[in-house]
Image (cartoon, rainbow, N blue to C red):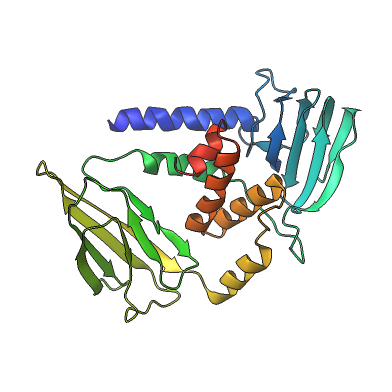
Amino acid sequence: MQSVKNIFCAFLLLGYCIASGAAGDPAVAMVTDLEGKALVLDDSRKPAVTLLSEIRQDARVQLDAGGRLVAVYLGSGQTWEMKGPAVVLFRAQQPESESGAKPQARGNALSKASKDIRIKPVAVAQAAIVMRSVKPSLKLKLLNPLGNKTLEERPAFAWKSLAPDIPYRFALLDDTGRTLFETSVVDTSLQLPAQVQLKEATTYTWSVSAQHPDGSAFSNASDFSLAPAALRRQVESLRPAANSPFSERIAFAAWLEEMALRDEARKYWKAAAAERPDDPRLKVMADE
């Protein structure tokens, strides 16, 4: 089983390398919206560009007629829009047109940012998410919070059902291993009681265990911490409106990933996956 997982992850990473260009080449941009087909011309394999692809410096991208590509430059946070038919050369600071329409600057990837917000690629996290989502034997699938920071001062815990009407044992521990709260619940979610107060800068561990009707015992555990108040304020200051361009919401989700706010990011990945149901990368990021 482990060898199958390793092979699967190797193929995923190989696909990522093909879409991103040769290993070791510096990436200057990441695709945050794509309509139509685009190819990297200066690679003998002519790999397809996809949503969330990294574009390396001096890559030449061909965009088909009627196509549209939006990319954020990783160093500056600036967004550029390109329309096909065109061949675009991605220079270190901005894209240039080799043929077709000139790329148009569209401002900061996060329109509410008062200064440049740098966004890191999310493809590496993508591989880790796929590995985590492969269901281990006899482990409950935990949904949230999952090994990251949460914006909620009293987060709601959730996990996937094993079978109807079976009891689950929930426990919450602090960073010293002390049990803060423990209870049984016939449900797949739980809200902490008001008397349990969580603190910033503390890593908590929560676990859930249960017995399947067939007698099998299942359990799983994950860590989380509360996002500092300053980070919570920054999130709200940058949060795009519901009707913001698709590319801005993708950029915001990528920034949330960079800030280790995975649960919050997943809300945006799920919404994006609903808008673009045929995009496999969005399904991966949404854990679907």
On screen, 162 above or below 22? below
In the depicted view, which residue is nearer to us: 193 or 207? 193
Q: Residue at x 80, y 40 (%)?
A: 81
Q: Is residue 91 visible?
A: no
In the depicted view, which residue is nearer to us: 17 or 219? 219
Q: Residue at x 67, y 63 (%)?
A: 238
Q: Quadrant of residue 123?
A: top right
Residue 268 image position (x, y, % from top left)? 57, 51
Q: Is residue 22 left or right of residue 138?
A: right
Residue 223 image position (x, y, % from top left)? 36, 61
Residue lying farthest to the bottom in this orientation: 195
Residue lying farthest to the top in this orientation: 44
Q: Residue at x 19, y 52 (%)?
A: 165
Q: Is residue 203 visible?
A: yes
In the depicted view, which residue is nearer to us: 82 or 274? 274
Q: Residue at x 69, y 52 (%)?
A: 243
On screen, 61 above or below 177? above
Residue 82 image position (x, y, % from top left)? 82, 36
Q: Is residue 148 left or right of residue 196?
A: right
Please identify the quadrant where the N terminus is shown.
Answer: top left
Q: Quadrant of residue 136?
A: top left
Q: Quadrant of residue 185?
A: bottom left
On screen, 38 above or below 260? above
Q: Is residue 127 left or right of residue 136?
A: right
Residue lying farthest to the left in this orientation: 215
